[in-house]
Amino acid sequence: MTGLDFHPVFTRLLFLLGGVGVTVLIAGLAFVFGLLLAVGLAVLRFENQGTWRRLSRSYSTALTNTPQLSQIFAVFYCLPLMGVMVSPFLSVVIGMTLNAAAYLADILGAGMARVPAVYHEVALTLGLNRRQTYLRVILPYAGRTMFPALANHFQIMILGSAMASIFGVEDLTGRAYDIGSTTFRVLEVMLVTGGLYALLSFALTGVFSLFRRTMERMV
Amino acid sequence: MKANWNSLLLGLCAVFGALWGGGAGARDSAVIRASGHINIGVEPGLPPLGEYDDHNELAGYDVDIGRQIARGMGVEPRFVTLASSGRIPYLMAGKVDIVLGGLTLTPGRAEVIAFSRPLYSEQFAVITPADRGITSFADLESGVYRLIEVRGSTAVAYLQQRVPKARMLLLESYADAIRALAQGRGDAMVDVIEYVGHYLPSQPQVHWRIIRGFAPPVGDDCIGMSRQDVVLRGDVNRILNGMEHDGRLEQIHRRWFDPVVAERAP
């Protein structure tokens, strides 16, 4: 027996659980905005051969080869140097959005490249313009094909959002640190927090599986 | 992406079970002596207590004290670097045998670790950019001003008690806190000026205002160690008493703190 004492953690469990919502909100917002940005980047890549394509690829190269922590750090500390002050929460969401867009653009790009040529021909035959072709044919197909990869990335973002605590955000990890710094039961609170992340991640896996099955039935 | 709840439960049980049943604890003094070295936790981001010098070597008040403790015990010092929030967890996990890093004796901490006799007393000051209009500690009571503090520092608990209305942004290090304060993310910081003063020159564009004397000495800075090992506590206190007696304690204090007070703090 190592002297582990979970009582101080369990008495603050409600406070800790409050951080789950913040964690999901950060990851959710960053995923949605990142996905929107990623669609733009992927389309640029798909539609162009020259500068725009290179720019889009350079963006992904730059952001997938630097730590997400550095990117949030840049938003948090560099934007104020340019006179732009955003809250810690928003800084983290912006940093994670920029990072997610780079990865999601790669995923969507791969999905768009797998759309069979016949789909494009059918869209053309039906008289769809480019915008309609993207919205009704290419993106739904790419989204369906790459759904497992997109869902996995969201789970990675849920776990990666733990770094928000470094910037003073009271997410699940931030609240765990708060409890640890007042009760000094850091090991205990981190074990419970790790368990909560695992539960959250598994719950999301279940939701995504259900969503995918529903989607497949609808097609 | 398949959800396997059995695997999850099994994994969690394995982790909890391993930690519950056989986790590491702090080494006792007999083991420390037999090993020939003592692991000393110091914080390298907290000058003058700990920092990397021009030769990239650890230096500072805590490093000198640690060396003297090791010498007194007849073992080699091995310094383990950590952050403020890691001081007690490192000790409780057995990653260090003793820990320094501006560890203030508080009743809460005394419930989980043991403290040596005091090394020196700390006193809080308000550190604020002059243009924020804060002229006294009482100004912070209104809740209008946002404070920036370092997570795990004694100041957080002090402020939660003294100025409960004040909003607080908790960051990980003094360097981050001072940068954020200079950039306008907060209005003031309350902490020990001897620690924070080192970072103020890094923001030369800010005219800093230091408000002192509003609080009694907040506590004694001590060396932390395991509660179980009474022998180690006795050894450390004996060495510190010896250092006080022959003037080494005062000498080390003067060496590291006098320049801070004279040169660094505005």
Image: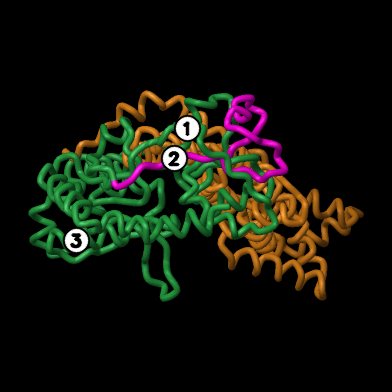
Chain colours: A orange, B green
Taking the spot 41% from the left edge, 26% from the top edge, the residue there is A12
Image quadrant occupied by the N terminus of chain A: top left
Question: Does B21 appear in magenta?
Answer: no
Q: Image quadrant of residue A192?
A: top left
Quick one: SS at disc 2?
A: loop
Cα gap from disc 1 to disc 2, whole angstroms: 7 Å
Whole-percent x, y for residue B42 in the image: 34, 56
Label 3 neighbourhood size at 10 Å, few (<14), some (14-19), many (20+)? many
- Judging from the image, mark 1 belongs to the subunit labelled B
In this rendering, does residue A23 appear at all? no
Q: Which residue is mark 2?
A: B123
Tag 1: residue type? Ala
Disc 1 from disc 3: Cα separation = 35 Å
Determine if marks 1 and 2 fall on one subunit: yes
Which badge, 1 or 2, comes first in the chain's sequence? Answer: 2
Please say if B38 is above or below A17.
Answer: below
Q: Residue at x 37, y 57 (%)?
A: B254
- Residue A70 in the image: state x and y as whole percent: 59, 60
Looking at the rendering, the stretch of residues picked out in magenta corresponds to B119-147
Residue of label 1: B215
Q: Which mark is residue B70?
A: 3
Q: Toward the viewer: B250 or B53?
A: B250
Q: Position of residue B255 (x, y in %)?
A: 37, 61
Residue B193: x percent and y percent? 50, 47
Amino acid carrying mark 3 in the image: Ala
- Element under label 1? loop
- Mark 2 neighbour class, 10 Å CA radius: few under 14, some 14 to 19, many 20 or more: some
How many marks on residues?
3
